[in-house]
Image: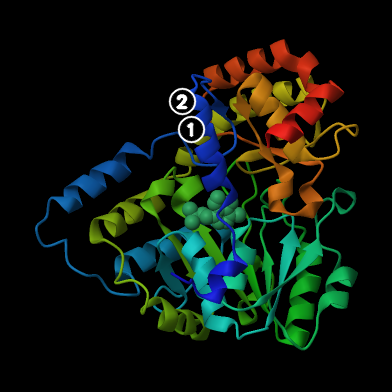
């Protein structure tokens, strides 16, 4: 069967392919330790699960739901925004619950892009921004984030990339994969530039509560609502990645435009999940604190593991990962990642999957228990000599 041309614009997701390889290695009894994926292993708060169970037992709670989500959920999102970022969002018109923020990326692209419209996307970045742009018929234009500029965009660089076809710009602070927080002066300039050129700014904000004392929203910048949208998610902050719960917020006109597309895609969110989300959003801040104590301990171990690998990293990073520079003598993070996988039976994400700017970097997830990270450290210590021998680099190149 011949697929549509749009399918040729995207590849199978890197992790989907890599997980198959890990499965194959595990079938050979390799017991691979996966430090790659940012799917929280900690459970959601007990109250969230109880709210789901209570609601699911009600025979009246199994029908199709409103495309906008129930008012109580939108109110809970609005109160959470006020409490978390001191931002007022109108619960009736400025919030749209989503089945995770990933689907929001697609909805935004499908709502705003015509064939050939250009979308500015950071390099490195979450690969979905480019995939959704391509699937919607847009053209990806990458703007560089580099360590020299603390992984912030250069306004001059962005100015030089804007054309009369530029329609959208994606930003993502706190940034994944680099772990940098937003710089409000730069974002202010960026929003000014976007306003001048009528470019919609989308901030993807799922990591603001992980190892971050100062959660920020794009809407804290004056006038941002006129030109920006923001995506949030309970996946990381509340350990609910599998539940598929997020939302987009912004001006009511934008929300209605996105709803036009979304209401043709799904038939609302399962009511018990909405009830559980309300409980999650009403939990007090101690729920993040408890997670963050665990993540902070794990991060110390990850730093130790990276020291053994002679990698360099910034200890002020926030979010659910550590982003680290590989030794200069290794020219490509995918080779280094494979060396570690095949020699030490530990999988670490190569930064190249997030873009060319990630070629010299690795990203390690904090979603693994301390004892398993300790085990990974032991394996890497034992095989360290193998990782830095040239013959291994050619051995891996042959294998991959
Ligand atoms: C930067 C970024 N945005 C969005 C997502 C998707 O999150 P969700 O589970 O809300 O779809 C991820 C998930 O890894 C991410 O890293």
The numbered disc on residue 27 is 2
Q: Residues within 10 Å of mark 2 (few under 14, many from 20)?
A: few
Secondary structure beneath label 2: helix
Relative horizontal placement of residue 359, taking residue 341 as reference (left or right): right
User: Marks 2 and 1: in contact by CB < 8 Å?
Assistant: yes
Q: Is residue 48 above or below residue 127?
A: above
Give the image location of residue 295, x and y in percent: 57, 32
Q: Is residue 205 above or below residue 224?
A: above
Q: Which residue is tagged 1?
A: 23
Q: Residue at x 77, y 70 (%)?
A: 188
Secondary structure beneath label 1: helix
- Give the alpha-carbon distance from disc 1 to disc 2, as whole Å: 6 Å
Q: Residue at x 29, y 72 (%)?
A: 267
The furthest residue to the front: 1
Relative horizontal placement of residue 400, taking residue 156 as reference (left or right): left
Give the image location of residue 172, x and y in percent: 66, 59
Quadrant containing ligand 1 reads bottom right
In the image, 97 versus 287, the foreground residue is 97
């Amino acid at each position: 069967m011949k697929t549509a041309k749009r399918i040729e614009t995207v590849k199978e997701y890197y992790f989907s392919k890599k997980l198959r390889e890990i499965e194959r290695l595990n079938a050979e009894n390799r017991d691979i330790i996966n430090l790659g994926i940012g799917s929280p292993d900690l459970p959601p708060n007990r109250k969230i699960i109880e709210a789901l169970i209570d609601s699911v037992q009600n025979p009246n709670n199994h029908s199709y739901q409103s495309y906008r989500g129930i008012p109580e959920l939108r109110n809970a999102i609005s109160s959470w925004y006020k409490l978390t970022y001191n931002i007022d969002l109108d619960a009736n018109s400025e919030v749209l619950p989503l089945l995770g923020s990933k689907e929001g990326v697609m909805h935004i692209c499908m709502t705003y892009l015509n064939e050939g419209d250009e979308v500015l996307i950071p390099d490195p970045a979450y690969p979905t921004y480019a995939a959704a742009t391509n699937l919607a018929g847009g053209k990806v234009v990458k703007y560089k984030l580099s360590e020299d500029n603390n992984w912030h965009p250069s306004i001059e660089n962005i100015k030089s990339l804007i054309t009369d076809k530029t329609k959208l710009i994606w930003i993502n602070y706190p940034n994944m994969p680099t772990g940098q927080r937003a710089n409000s002066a730069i974002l202010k300039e960026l929003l000014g530039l976007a306003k001048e050129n009528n470019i919609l700014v989308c901030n993807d904000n799922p990591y603001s509560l992980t190892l971050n004392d100062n959660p920020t929203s794009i809407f804290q910048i004056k006038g941002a609502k006129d030109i920006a949208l923001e995506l949030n998610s309970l996946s990381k902050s509340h350990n609910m990645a599998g539940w598929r719960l997020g939302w987009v917020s912004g001006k009511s006109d934008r929300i209605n435009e996105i709803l036009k597309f979304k209401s043709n895609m799904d038939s609302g969110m399962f009511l018990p999940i909405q009830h559980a989300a309300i409980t999650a959003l009403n939990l007090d801040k101690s729920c993040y604190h408890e997670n963050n104590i665990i993540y902070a301990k794990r991060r110390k171990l990850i730093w130790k593991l990276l020291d053994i690998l002679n990698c360099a990293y910034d200890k002020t990073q926030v979010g659910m990962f550590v982003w680290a520079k590989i030794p200069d003598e290794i020219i490509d993070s995918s080779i280094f990642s494979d060396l570690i996988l095949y020699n030490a039976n530990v999988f670490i994400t190569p930064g190249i999957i997030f873009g060319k700017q990630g070629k010299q970097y690795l990203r390690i997830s904090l979603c693994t228990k301390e004892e398993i990270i300790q085990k990974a450290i032991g394996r890497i210590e034992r095989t360290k000599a193998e990782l830095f021998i040239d013959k291994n680099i050619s051995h891996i190149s042959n294998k991959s």
